[in-house]
Amino acid sequence: MKVGLFIPCYVDQFYPKVGIATYELLIKLGCDVRFPMKQTCCGQPMANSGYQHLTKGCDANFIANFSEFDYIVCPSGSCVLHVKDHLHDEKQEDLAAAMRKKVFELTEFITDVLKVDHIEGNFPHKVGMHVSCHGQRGLKLSQMTELNAPFFSKPEQLLSNIKGLDLVALTRKDECCGFGGTFCVTEEAVSVKMGQDRIRDHEKHDVDYITGGDMSCLMHLEGILKRQKSNIKTIHIAEILNSGIK
């Protein structure tokens, strides 16, 4: 199984340890993982701002870097959803269409492709799970609480056997953190207030860490936590899962 590791540009620049944890985790799970060195931004920031027509170069570069792989795996639901929905190339549209089906978010890939339903490990901390909107509502990584349907969560399923990890039940389980990509720039005040509300829910449950599958959301929450001088830390789910496998 030849896997191309797709690392979002902000993770590469600001949170490289998340990329390393993802790489190590996939290796430990038996994958042949490669990191294309010429990969760049997938184009999501431009598309979110209404400039989809400016992402053609990003699309062409993505195809050039990842076309050889059986699967493309990324520790970010928002970037994966963007590629699944928007990867196109006028000169190679059949190839682009095939690649859109091979892109997976990390926990989705582990549960749905590798068929791993739990990971043994040790993380003796009280943890709150932040469910990112793109992963939940776009990729269906977990059930939306407003639906009258059986609950499921692929990330929580993987965390369930981590020894010592106390995963709390939040009051508003799938509320948006307010990051929203460029929304946090154009609507800063609203974005910050939403982030503060999200943190307050975790604070009420006295968590040590906030985890999630999108480092962009965690980055937003981390900034607010630091300004509030909070003791709560953020950690990507890949870091928790990777720490548990020897």
Image: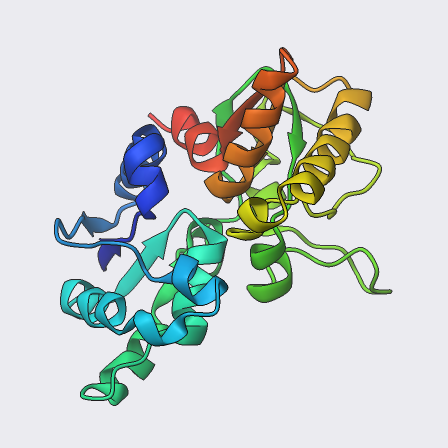
Q: Is residue 189 above or below residue 103?
A: above
Query: Quadrant location of the N terminus?
Result: bottom left
Locate residue 10 relative to residue 135 in the image: left or right. left
Q: Position of residue 115 (x, y in %)?
A: 45, 56
Pick whichever, 207 or 63, lies toward us.
63
- Where residue 138 sits, quadrant-wise, is bottom right
Q: Residue at x 42, y 71 (%)?
A: 84
Q: Residue at x 64, y 46 (%)?
A: 131
Count numbered badges in the picture: 0
Q: Position of residue 139 (x, y in %)?
A: 55, 64
Locate residue 160 relative to residue 213 in the image: left or right. right
Locate residue 169 relative to residue 118 in the image: left or right. right
- Res. 193 visible in picture: yes
- Where residue 85 sits, quadrant-wise, is bottom left
Q: Position of residue 213 (x, y in %)?
A: 51, 43
Q: Is residue 162 above or below residue 47?
A: above
Pick whichever, 13 or 26, lies toward us.
13
Q: Residue at x 79, y 60 (%)?
A: 150
Q: How is the image coloured?
A: rainbow
Pick whichever, 101 or 224, lies toward us.
224
Q: Residue at x 79, y 35 (%)?
A: 170
Q: Position of residue 191 (x, y in %)?
A: 66, 42
- Res. 108 visible in picture: no
Locate residue 79 relative to residue 169 in the image: left or right. left
- Where residue 95 sits, quadrant-wise, is bottom left
Query: Quadrant location of the C terminus?
Result: top left
